[in-house]
Image (cartoon, rainbow, N blue to C red):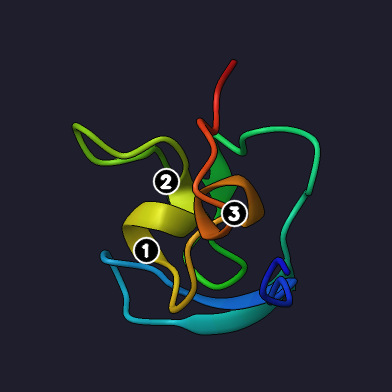
Amino acid sequence: MMPDIIPESEITCPQCGFKKRETMPTDACQWFYECKSCHTVLNPKTGDCCVYCSYGTVPCPPIQQDKSCCN
């Protein structure tokens, strides 16, 4: 039985520290995210597949399911 997927993650801007809860896409990687406060465009850190895996409180749904994120 697969564990339940957590669809939301709180993403934190490394530039200004602003936090926002967002619903993650389930069918694609999100490689860019614009901070709602300072408008910095976030990209994944080296080795991470998406901005949620780099800056979120919960990894993206494919990673939660032990699947490759960016096929």
Using the numbered discs, state the Cα–Cα distance from disc 3 to disc 1 in whole angstroms: 19 Å
Image-quadrant location for residue 18: bottom left
Foreground mark, 3 or 1?
Answer: 3
The circle on residue 55 is 1
Q: Residue furthest left?
A: 46
Foreground mark, 2 or 3?
Answer: 3
Residue 68 placed where, x, y %? 50, 30
N-term-proximal mark, 3 vs 1: 1
Q: Are marks 3 and 1 in contact (CB under 8 Å)?
A: no
The residue lying toward the viewer, choosing from 1 and 34, is 1
Q: Measuring 41% from the left and 35% from the top, which residue is drawn there?
A: 49
Judging from the image, what secondary structure is the residue with disc 2 in?
strand
In the image, residue 46 above or below residue 21: above
The residue lying toward the viewer, choosing from 9 and 20, is 9
| Residue that carries the numbered disc 3 in the rendered image | 65
Q: Are marks 2 and 1 in contact (CB under 8 Å)?
A: yes
Image-quadrant location for residue 43: top left
N-term-proximal mark, 2 vs 1: 2
Foreground mark, 2 or 1?
Answer: 1
N-term-proximal mark, 2 vs 3: 2
Q: What is the total number of numbered labels drawn onto the structure image?
A: 3
The circle on residue 30 is none
The amino acid type, in three-letter code, at marker 3 is Gln
The amino acid type, in three-letter code, at marker 1 is Tyr
Judging from the image, what secondary structure is the residue with disc 3 in?
loop
Using the numbered discs, state the Cα–Cα distance from disc 2 to disc 1 in whole angstroms: 9 Å
Q: Measuring 54% from the left and 60% from the top, which residue is drawn there?
A: 64
Judging from the image, what secondary structure is the residue with disc 1 in?
helix
| Residue that carries the numbered disc 2 in the rendered image | 42
Q: Quadrant of the N terminus?
A: bottom right
Q: Quadrant of the C terminus?
A: top right
Instruction: Tell me if mark 3 has few (under 14), some (14-19) or many (20+) residues whose alpha carbon lies within 10 angstroms of its own.
Output: some
